[in-house]
Amino acid sequence: MFHGFRIFLFVFLWLLACVLLGLSADRIWYTRHLPTGDPLNNGKPFYDPIIAELLFTTSLAILWIPWILLAIGRRREGLRRYSFTHSVVGLFILTVLFIVGAAVSAHFWGGLSWCHRYWQCRILTALVGVAWAAALVSLLLFILEFHYAWRHRAWGYPMHGRYDPANYNSSNYPIEKRRWKWF
């Protein structure tokens, strides 16, 4: 049950990252191609640094999440990059990046209810909402993964989580490759 829920959350986070990538790309396109006479920045092209950060974060998530799903689904093990430690550290980095992006974008564009008749204001409002949703899903995934690894002392074990700790030597891999001495 836990692993199915984990996979569902990873897929949902990947979908949120795809939507956020599209919204961020649209915002960058709009700010780099302002028509002459546009009241925004007197018609001079610019970019928002937080949009670039969200673009980087979503690109990282879009590339990293399928790799994690393949490692879980194919039951990869034997290397450090397939361990719970790798998963927890990666989720921590994604969570921090998503929270920073959502917080800064909410600070800039949190109160745009006065301009909802304009398309770009609706894009920014959707961007803030999706950024917070991605931040919350990644935080939930981080908490679940960290709790599972902590409770089962599975830091060095494969992230697929389908092993019997009492009888873990039954695998084809020697124990030294699966459980490192510093954990």
Image (cartoon, rainbow, N blue to C red):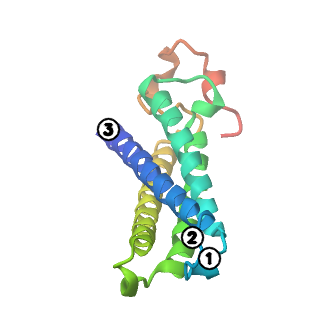
Q: Residue at 42% of width from left, 82% of height from top?
A: 112
Residue type at the position of mark 1: Gly
Residue type at the position of mark 2: Pro
Labels 3, 2: front one: 2
Residue ID for mark 3: 4
Q: Position of residue 157 (x, y in %)?
A: 55, 32
**Which element carries disc 1, helix, strand or loop?**
helix
Label 3 – label 2 distance at C-alpha: 48 Å
Depth check: 89 or 36 in front?
Answer: 36
Q: Position of residue 137 (x, y in %)?
A: 41, 57
Residue ID for mark 1: 43
Q: Earlier in the sequence, mark 1 or mark 2?
A: 2
Above-or-below relation of 20 to 66: below
Q: Using a 10 Å C-alpha cutoff, classify the residue at mark 2 as few (fewer than 14 neighbours), some (14 to 19) or many (20 or more).
A: some
Residue type at the position of mark 3: Gly
Q: Which mark is residue 35?
A: 2
Q: Position of residue 26 (x, y in %)?
A: 50, 59
Depth check: 162 or 115 in front?
Answer: 115
